[in-house]
Image (cartoon, rainbow, N blue to C red):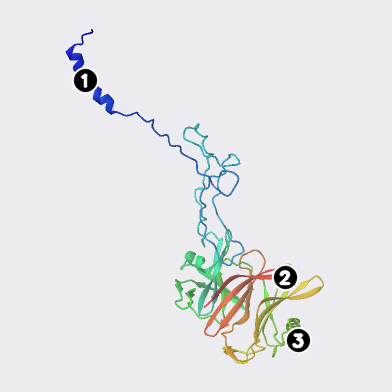
Amino acid sequence: MIRVKPSLMVFVLLFSPIACSQGPIAPSAVTATFTPYVGGTQTALAARPASPTPWFAGTETALANLTPTPWVAGTETALAVASSSPTPPPLPTFEFPATATLPPPAFEDGTFSPVFYGSSSFLLLGGFSQDRGWISAENTSTYINSEAEYDFFSPRGSIKLRGSTLERSPTCQHYFMRSPMALPEPMVGVASGWVTGKRETRDLSTTDPTYIQALTEWFQSKDIPPNEIQITRILQADLEGDGVNEVLLSATYFKEASGELTETGYYSVVLMRKVVGNDVVTVPLISEYYVSSAPRPSDPRTYTLAEAIDLNRDGILEVVVDVSRWEGNGAIVFRVDGQNAREVLRAIC
């Protein structure tokens, strides 16, 4: 019989309950982490957000200065990679440009000009920037220099005026600049020095039978029987600078001078007569013709030729059309390209 020392027996008895009270030790759970999958392509892409660029309504080009998204090489399917997998290679480095937006246009560098129109006050139609194209009036308003000088043009002459603080009409929400003097007729204004060597235009007689016949034939080609032919202006100009003149004409007929009511046969149109090969074609810039069978209030618009002037300095003249209506006025600028014409600026208040 083996004899156990009392001290050893006490030690064993003390630690035996502790050992018995502990259950089996479970291994710690391993949680895998996964690489998210970018859907929409067969390749796993790393997408960076594009820098927003404001859009400029009515322009020739809407410029988008977006930051390109780097491409991450990978397999044809996005793989879920657990944390126990080997460390993936680092993503390709990509240097973002220092700025994601273009600097504001300025008068001083000669690459930007607003476009105004009016006589007693000047309505802001918009503007043109050499690196942005045509700019809406809303965006142009933020770049106006109240101390700048402007050149104002009409087919009959030009005048230089100093600008003033831009204001916003509470009625039509368009911007305008007060005129320091009342001009004899509505004129087109640009930054001083923007237009150099203005191309000559010439007014022709509105009673010239050649153009009365041309307008009559155009109405007949549209199956429109006008009540009366009334030409309001004929302007001859070499729009494209190729040595061949185009003829622009506007015509309007309303029984009432106010133009508040419309009847069948009322109209207001602006047309361009252009030589194409051996033919002369008629291109409408804008036209409204009323066919209602009874008088009705409709607030019709009257369109009249105002000016032909190179507003974006590309050698081709834009056509500025005066717009008047019951208790309102403004202008539209058309860009002529061959036999096509499109609107690039507009403000009517």
Q: Position of residue 300 (x, y in %)?
A: 59, 84
Residue 99 placement (x, y as % from top left): 50, 51
Q: Is residue 93 left or right of residue 336?
A: left
Tell me the residue at 80%/74% (across/down): 279
Residue farthest toward the left in the current orientation of the protein: 6
Dot 2: what SS?
A: loop
Element at label 1: helix
> What type is the residue that disc 2 sits on?
Gln
Separation (CA) of disc 1 from disc 3: 131 Å
Nearer to the camera, 25 or 87: 25
Residue tagged 3: 209
Q: Residues within 10 Å of mark 1 (few under 14, many from 20)?
A: few
Q: Can residue 192 be spotted in the picture?
A: no
Measured in 3D between alpha carbons, the distance from the residue under mark 3 to the one under mark 2, in whole angstroms, is 24 Å
**Residue labelled with disc 2:** 339
- Decide which of tag 1 and tag 3 comes sooner along the chain: 1
- Label 3 is placed on what type of residue? Pro
Q: Is residue 44 above or below residue 340?
A: above
Badge 1 vs badge 3, beta-carbon distance below 8 Å:
no
Camera-near label (3 vs 2) is 2
The answer to whether the residue labelled 2 contacts the one labelled 1, judged by CB atoms less than 8 Å apart, is no
Which sits earlier in the primary sequence, circle 2 or circle 1?
1
Q: Which residue is mark 1?
A: 13
* First reached walking from the N terminus: tag 3 or tag 2: 3
**Whole-percent x and y of residue 167?**
45, 73
Q: Amino acid at mark 1?
A: Leu
Which label sits in the foreground, 1 or 3? 1
Please provide percent x and percent y for residue 36: 50, 44
Mark pair 2, 1: CA separation: 110 Å
Q: Which quadrant of the rendered structure holds the N terminus?
A: top left
Residue depicted at 46% across the width and 38% down the height = 33
